[in-house]
Amino acid sequence: MAMNKFGPVVAWLACAAPAVAAPPSRAVAPQQEREVWITIGTDALQPVRSSFQREGVALPAPTFQTEGVAVMRLSESQVMRLGQSVHEELNRCAGFIAHASEAEAIAAAKADAAPAQNLATPTYSINNAPSVNALLAEVRELNIRNTINSLSTNWTNRYYNAQTGQDAAAWLRGQWADLAKDRPDISVAFFKHFSWKQQSVIATIQGTTHPSEIVVLGGHLDSINQSSPSAGVAPGADDDASGVSCLTEILRVAIAKGYRPARTVKFMAYAGEEVGLYGSDAIAKSYKNDAANVVGVLQLDMTNYKGSAYDFGITMDRTSPALNTHVINLITTYLPTLTYTQFNCGYGCSDHASWTSAGFPASMPFEATINTDNKKIHTPEDTLTYMGGTADHSVKFAKLGAAFMAEVAKGASEGNVPPRVGPALNNTAALDATYKVPRCAEEGLSCDSGTLLNGRANLGPEVNRPNTLKGSCPDGTSGIFHHDESIDRIKVGTPDGTEMVAGKAVKVDVTVFTYSTAEDRLDLYAAANADSPTWTFIGTLAPTLAGTSTLSTTYTLPAGGRQALRARFRYGGAAGACGTGTYDDHDDLMFAVGAAATP
Ligand code: BES
Ligand code: ZN
């Protein structure tokens, strides 16, 4: 979006209202009609041109056009007329932006056609079920309803440049600070805007292990009365007290359940969305300037009016395809009884667009679709009463937002084991000094002992021998290295390259040195809990080649965050987790296993 030093130069056009709200840069009214450069979606050109023609006005031809966006020069009165036309012809609000110069408009058109891709897309995963389910169980409709009620009735409006708009911001800041008063890792502050009265409010939960990686949950604090922006009654109960109230409930639930995210989580209530995404634009640009690592943004704008048979409408334009897929996976995993559909806004209809323009991945699950949403927004009738007097529909969004928080930021709520953060890896084990065995402490796709188990006892020798949990089972010491028996390597992993989680089938590969195919046997055991291992028999494998070979089998991972495998290679004798044969080699491998996606 184009900016001058005060902020975006936007001709905001209220939905269906022939009035241009004064942009903040224009404190003094211009003396004569000004020319304005605008960018507009090319899909709007033909219908708008027809509408102009019916009134005998010719819409000028675009001076520049690129993928989906056109640039043209208009007078201010034409800009006002255009706002009306867009609404009448396309049944949506004015989705165009005015710019100070042609150069700015062209730059904006280019940026719009090819959104910034300056940062790598993170990998999203679902492996935090215990924490997510704890959070979801705590969400309460009454809390959301009460916050919607306060925001929509305590002030005439929450207009971005009205004192009441700033009063509402101060109230929200107080509410969030009160929720967080016993959590020194949570701070609540204004993000200061200097060109208008209302401030954005940000609550930050500092990440425990990955604090520089940021997860944003946002909604807009301001409201607007389209026919009388600065003084008219604008409860904005749905648009967007409902989104801000979901954020408030998610923050409350996080604190109630002792949730501590691995990544930093920020709750943002943006100022000035209704006049051109002002607040979010300033914040997203500032994060971009700081080269902040924002790994995911969830926008909640309008969550309480159920106008569609579907529970969620996923906004597909100006959002991240990868993050949208993740949001859909969150719905199917954690809210399996709820339904979703997909739709396009057709323009930068809410604050997700600011983040997308700044190059960050954003998603916006919406209350309905573009044609089935709440028609009372931007009027005095956008009230809780109009939405049936409950926050039932918003509960779904608060739950989805809580799941988003815990699966994008990871970490754990009280009593739960935190899952891995970041992309799943093929891990190589390192000696764990406490357990005295090779260990993969991070969850991943597989765990490989590498060279740590090569040899047996003093033969080789085997480093860190005997490599059994806390020294629980010694090796036999007879023979010569790689003439007689040894286990040299153990690897465990999913055959399909997915994460090792409870309930998954995994393949175990054990590389052995065989002395006698007739007598040598490999016994395999698994323990769900390496802290007090109970060895469950997997099977006995017989080598078919003398010398080095790899024997493989599969088993199903039990539940447990710290699991272990025990391999025993023996000359004669019977299966057992620990034997006393003088050629016996015993080796353990310890590895992290994620929780199953659904409980
Ligand atoms: N919540 C609306 C956007 C919206 C309305 C999305 C209906 C989907 C269906 C938002 O607050 C809004 O009104 N946005 C402005 C954006 C503009 C000022 C850049 C709009 O749509 O006109
Ligand atoms: Zn809105």
Image (spheres, grey):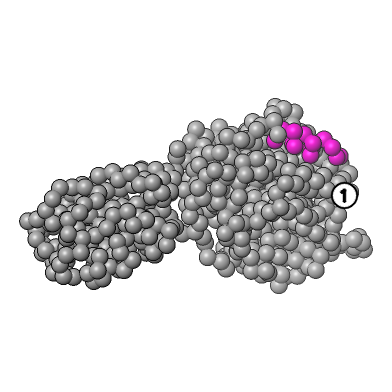
In the rendered view, does 553 fall on the left or right side of 6? left
In the rendered view, does 331 fall on the left or right side of 54? left
Q: Quadrant of residue 194?
A: bottom right
Residue 579, image x and y in percent? 21, 52
> What is the quadrant of the N terminus in the image?
bottom right
Query: Which one is in front, 474 or 394?
Result: 474
Q: Is residue 362 magenta?
A: no
In the rendered view, does 503 fall on the left or right side of 134? left
> What is the quadrant of the C terminus in the image?
top left
Q: Residue at x 40, y 57 (%)?
A: 435
Picture mark count: 1
Q: Residue at x 41, y 61 (%)?
A: 432
In the rendered view, does 22 fall on the left or right side of 371? right
Residue 249, image x and y in percent? 68, 40
Mark 1 residue CB less than 8 A from any atom of ligand 1: no
Query: Which one is in front, 199 or 412?
Result: 412
The rendered magenta stretch, by its main secondary structure, is classed as helix
Q: Is residue 153 magenta?
A: yes
Query: Which one is in front, 326 or 496?
Result: 496
On the question of residue 489 being in view, the answer is yes
Residue 498, image x and y in percent? 37, 53
Residue 573, image x and y in percent? 13, 50
Q: Residue at x 92, y 61 (%)?
A: 28
On the question of residue 18 being in view, the answer is no
Q: Residue furthest left?
A: 518
**Which contiguous range is marked in magenta?**
144-156
Q: Residue at x 48, y 36 (%)?
A: 336
At numbered mark 1, what does the secondary structure look like: helix, strand or loop?
A: loop
Q: Residue at label 1?
A: 162
Q: Quadrant of residue 289?
A: bottom right
The amino acid marked with disc number 1 is: Ala
